[in-house]
Image (tube, grey):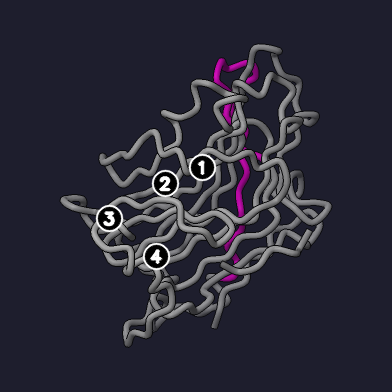
Amino acid sequence: MKKLTNCTLAILCLFLFSCKKETSSNQAVSASDNASISEAVQIKWQGAFLSYNNKPPSFFVPDKLFIKNGYARIYKESVKLNEQNFYSTRFKLVLPASLNIKGDSINFEAGVKNPLNSAFYDAVHGRDITLYIKGETNEASITNVATSDIDPSAPERAAIKLGQTVKKNVTELQHNFEDYGTFILQTFNRGVVAYRNDAYLSGLAYEKEPLIGRLKEIGITFKGSGYVDYIKVYNSVNGELLLSEDFNTEGQSNVIIAE
């Protein structure tokens, strides 16, 4: 399960996307003078069941219920569902102010899968995987969808979003994560970029959008009950690992903050 390798914006110049690990004197993460690393280490992943028809209503899921067997997953068997409830599940990590990560220069990488059997309803209604980040002044996301032969209506949802700017129908973001693969949201050089298994897919320039600012939250949303094998957040300028979680501690979130 842990066989994935660690994995820049080419709107105007493809060369810029190859600069994933340029050196820079800027630091992407730091603790405030009065805050200790131990405070930041207490953060943990939160789960959520997102109902489309309120049968049952949406609710939060504690880590003891979704972290087991070496991955994070909210099991459909854990709640009695209406057969017409095309639900989603989400994992999010809220970062304290003491952890000062620049949202405009990160690689948010996740090992994910969302196979055909991840939800009880027909695959035509599901299998989307969205990685998102939220900062103090803006937010961004990338959404992978199933291929058209499985879900003919999926292409429009295959998108990169930055604030109010959306790039839809990104054909490169149609892929069936039947087994684990890496999915990466990168911010670099005023752009948002999507990668899968280290391969560049597409990008979106900030243009008139404001900066994302200090990173406040990262998350993953699945249509259905997808799996997360691990997450890593790097500095996209110098490649420094900032935080990680491998979901190997049974029933307990164990976020590792790089010192």
Residue carrying label 3: 11
Compute the Cα span from label 2 to label 3. Answer: 17 Å
Question: In terms of depth relative to the viewer, which is nearer, 212 or 141?
Answer: 141
> Which picture quadrant has residue 90?
top right
Q: Circle 2 — which element?
A: strand
Q: Amino acid at mark 4?
A: Thr
Q: Circle 3 — which element?
A: loop
Residue carrying label 1: 130
The image position of residue 228, as x and y in percent, is 67, 50
Residue carrying label 4: 8
Residue in the picture at 63% in, 38% down: 176
Q: How many marks?
A: 4
> Which picture quadrant has residue 258?
bottom right
Farthest left residue? 208
Magenta span of residues: 41-61
Residue carrying label 2: 141
